[in-house]
Image (tube, rainbow, N blue to C red):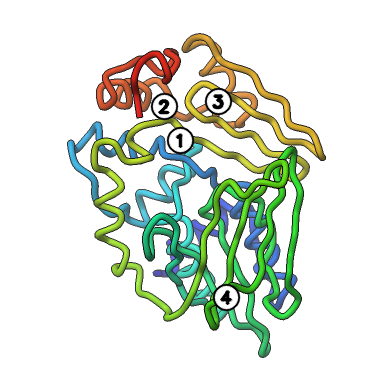
Amino acid sequence: MVAGELQRYLRLLGIRTPIAGPVGLDEIVHRHLCCVPFENVSKLLLLGREGAGRVTTLPEFLDGIEHHDLGGTCHTSNPFLASLLNALGYQADLLGADMSKPNVHTSIRVRLSGVEYHVDVGYGAPFRRAIRLDRLPWEFEQGRYRLVFDRASVPAAYQASVYSGGQCLHGYIVHPPAREAGFFDNEVIESYRPGMTFTSMLRIIRFFDDHAADLEDTRLSIHRGGETTTKLLGNMTELRAAVANDLAMPRCPIEEAVAVLEQLTGRSVFEEKGTAGAV
């Protein structure tokens, strides 16, 4: 990462002078999670422009944040944050994590003064700070969901689990060895195939200091404290207002992304999936 990119990245995160040590690490993680949305809009836009998927470059990632209120998924946010941390003098490794299959997710392992930390700003989960691996389990509740991070049964591996009502909804197992960002290139390309998660739905999650906003197609959920409120958006005007106001992304080209998604799926995002036969 060259000096100009480093300074631009920090500016977009609202960090003037990075602080060293655990406090500085927590600040960077918190600012990244809150300033850079988890979203697949940028993937839909790229697919619509070029007709195929590819790896996003750092300038494209930063342009999306600065000019369009965009962010990315684990294959952009975590690798680029790992590069930022290393440029600032942290020892940060990019790791793979297993979900439906091995190494489909990424996360970061930071070593600082003999202590290891888990960092993940690309899962759409409230990891608002670095998690010390010598102080597990770690738990956090937001709305109807409970996030747990703990040791896994596999040596040197750790597991993230998201629960609701006592049921585990999803999660991942992160494990060594450290990987170069290019290791995940095939997974990036695979994620653009028809019928994959991010070519079949609209997904945006935005974190704020005291709450989170979550958009899945046209279902908007606000998680604040121990409560979650949900409403369905009935048309593009309501969707545009929710993206601009609830998700605080007024410059997001949501109409263009929706047009690409509807072309890919052959259905309107405002149709019920169950009746429209979509995946």
Residue at 40 percent of width and 50 percent of height: 61
Q: Quadrant of residue 22?
A: bottom right
| Front: mark 3 or 1 | 3
Q: CA distance from mark 2 to mark 4?
A: 43 Å
Residue at 75 percent of width and 54 percent of height: 140
User: Mark 2: which amino acid?
Assistant: Pro
Q: Position of residue 224 (x, y in %)?
A: 77, 36
State which tag comes first along the sequence, 4 or 3: 4
Q: CA distance from mark 1 to mark 4?
A: 42 Å
Q: CA distance from mark 4 to mark 3?
A: 40 Å
Cβ–Cβ below 8 Å for labels 4 and 3? no
Residue at 70 percent of width and 43 percent of height: 145
Q: Position of residue 243 (x, y in %)?
A: 55, 25
| Front: mark 2 or 4 | 4
State which tag comes first along the sequence, 2 or 1: 1
Q: Position of residue 105 (x, y in %)?
A: 43, 59
| Front: mark 2 or 3 | 3
Task: Find disc 1 in the rendering and name its residue.
Answer: 68
Task: Find disc 3 in the rendering and name its residue.
Answer: 243
Cβ–Cβ below 8 Å for labels 3 and 1? no
State which tag comes first along the sequence, 3 or 1: 1
Residue count near mark 3 (Cα–Cα under 10 Å), binned few <14, some 14–19, many ≥20: many
Which numbered circle lies on residue 153? 4
State which tag comes first along the sequence, 2 or 3: 3
Residue count near mark 4 (Cα–Cα under 10 Å), binned few <14, some 14–19, many ≥20: few
Q: CA distance from mark 2 to mark 1?
A: 7 Å
Name the one closer to the observer, 7 or 55.
55
Q: Position of residue 216 (x, y in %)?
A: 51, 30
Which numbered circle lies on residue 253? 2
- At mark 1, the secondary structure is helix
